[in-house]
Amino acid sequence: MKYHIITLGCPKNSVDSEGMGGILAAQGHTAVTAPADADVVIVNTCSFIAAARDETLDVLRDMAASKTSGQQLIAAGCMAESHGALVGAVPGVDAILSTREWMKIGDIVGEKSTTDDRRPTTKKTFTSDLLIPLEAMPQVQAPVAQLVADTLAVEVPSSVVSGLAAEGGYADWRTAPIRRHAGGPSAYLKISDGCNLRCAFCTIPSFKGDMRSKAMGAILGEAQELAAQGVKEIVLVVQHLAD
């Protein structure tokens, strides 16, 4: 199938969109540059402020209004998590993926949905070949080495990601090192997800959850993959870099 991803909001969303694209490409799907040429259109939404939520709804309505016969429209990301009912009320949205579910994208592309149940229920397609293998991680000198080893060696429960635990696994697939596909000399690298602060003006923790840090070895593994693809500038992105 052919897919097109529209990314709204922050650089963290851009990294997640790249991850979704990598999963779909690994399954044999093909990216296209125009929504009209796609069998499935994925909108990675933003809900940080009211203007972002308005933009998200406008884009979803536009994509729904221009859907071709048989085309699937998927709403992913932050607004799917924070305002799922509002997103789901947009006529033409076929499936919803929250911030904590985007790695299930391969499970729902091409599937028919019902109005009452548009969230994925399976995890069968996210497998370890979509991650940088543990053995490929850079060696980090002690005393950091033990910390990295302890973090990366945590067995993943089968209820989280099927098939990863038997091969070493990661403590949390949301901070596992995804295969990277650089699109130019500069790239984003997400080093954690979520935030532990509860600022009165910010809603991010309510839909991203507490901060989960990516292990140092995993960060270096992604950085090396990007460098090997010609990236000269790596921009670290995170909800709260100083935490």
Image: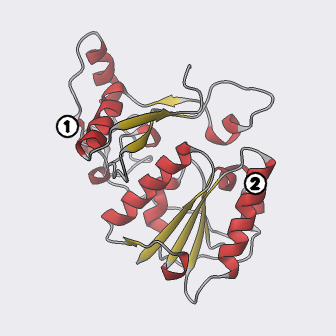
Task: Tell which residue pokes out farthest to the top in this image.
Answer: 143
Q: Is residue 109 above or below residue 173?
A: below
Residue occupying the point 40% across, 78% down: 1
Residue occupying the point 41% across, 43% down: 187
Q: Nearer the viewer, residue 97 or 219?
A: 219
- The label on residue 53 is 2
- Picture quadrant of residue 206: top right
Residue occupying the point 53% across, 62% down: 121
Q: Please, what is the three-letter code of the amino acid marked with disc 2? A: Arg
Q: Position of residue 160 (x, y in %)?
A: 44, 46
Tell whether 159 sits left or right of 206.
left
Q: Position of residue 196 (x, y in %)?
A: 63, 25
Tell whether 48 sits left or right of 19.
right
Q: Nearer the viewer, residue 188 or 107?
A: 188
Q: Please, what is the three-letter code of the amino acid marked with disc 1? A: Ala
Disc 1: which residue: 136
Q: Earlier in the sequence, mark 2 or mark 1?
A: 2
